[in-house]
Image (cartoon, rainbow, N blue to C red):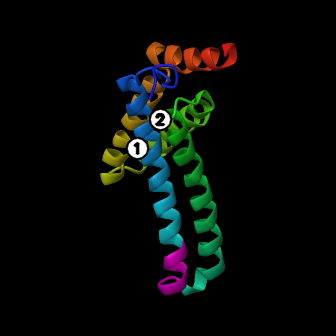
Amino acid sequence: MTTDSMTTSPARPTALVVGAAITALEGAALAGWGLYDVIAGFFWDSPALGRSEFGGVILLLLGLQPLLAGRALLRLRRWGRTPAVLTNSICLPVAYYMWQNGGAMQVLGVVIGVVGLIGIGALLNPKVTAVLYAQQSTAEGS
């Protein structure tokens, strides 16, 4: 391999990897919940058969979007940042309503809120912006 054929890609900042991982984890959680709903409708919750499957399929599709956004961020595609920030932002009202329920839900709500804030902070980090937009401007200049 010659030096001309090798392309140099900028290093991924830690904040980008953290933000992408959190977003992918949230997507996996949504997809897992959707899969559980589909399976529960068939085996345990027969009165809600159609409702469970429909809701499960919707959650599976909603989980796909953050998974793709996390993958795009790891590949330094800047389009992945918008859906990733949106997904992490949705964690905040979820955490608020979990806090309102009290008990163990409060603890889970705090965890979800903190994870959402960490994800937003990581994805809006200036180093992440510099890497994502420098990568795009390099591609346009070629």
Q: Main secondary structure of the magenta part?
A: helix
From the viewer's perspective, is residue 26 above or below residue 73?
A: below
Classify residue 19 as left or right of residue 110: right
Residue 90 visible to the viewer? no
Could you tell me how many numbered marks the image carries?
A: 2
Residue at screen point 56% across, 40% down = 69
| Image coordinates for residue 129, horizontal then vertical, percent | 52, 17
Residue 99 found in image quarter: top left
Q: Amino acid at mark 1?
A: Trp
Marker disc for residue 9:
none
Residue at mark 1: 99
| Image coordinates for residue 29, horizontal then vertical, percent | 44, 55
Say if mark 2 contacts mark 1, CB within 8 Å.
no
Residue at screen point 49% across, 36% down = 92
Q: How far separated are the C-alphas under marks 2 and 1? A: 32 Å
From the viewer's perspective, is residue 17 above or below residue 141?
A: below
Helix, strand or loop at label 1? It is helix
Instruction: Check residue 41 for magenta coloring.
Output: yes
Instruction: Check residue 21 for magenta coloring.
Output: no
Q: Nearer the viewer, residue 101 or 39?
A: 39
Marker disc for residue 74:
2
Mark toward the start of the polypeptide (2 vs 1)? 2
Magenta stretch in the rendered image: 38-45
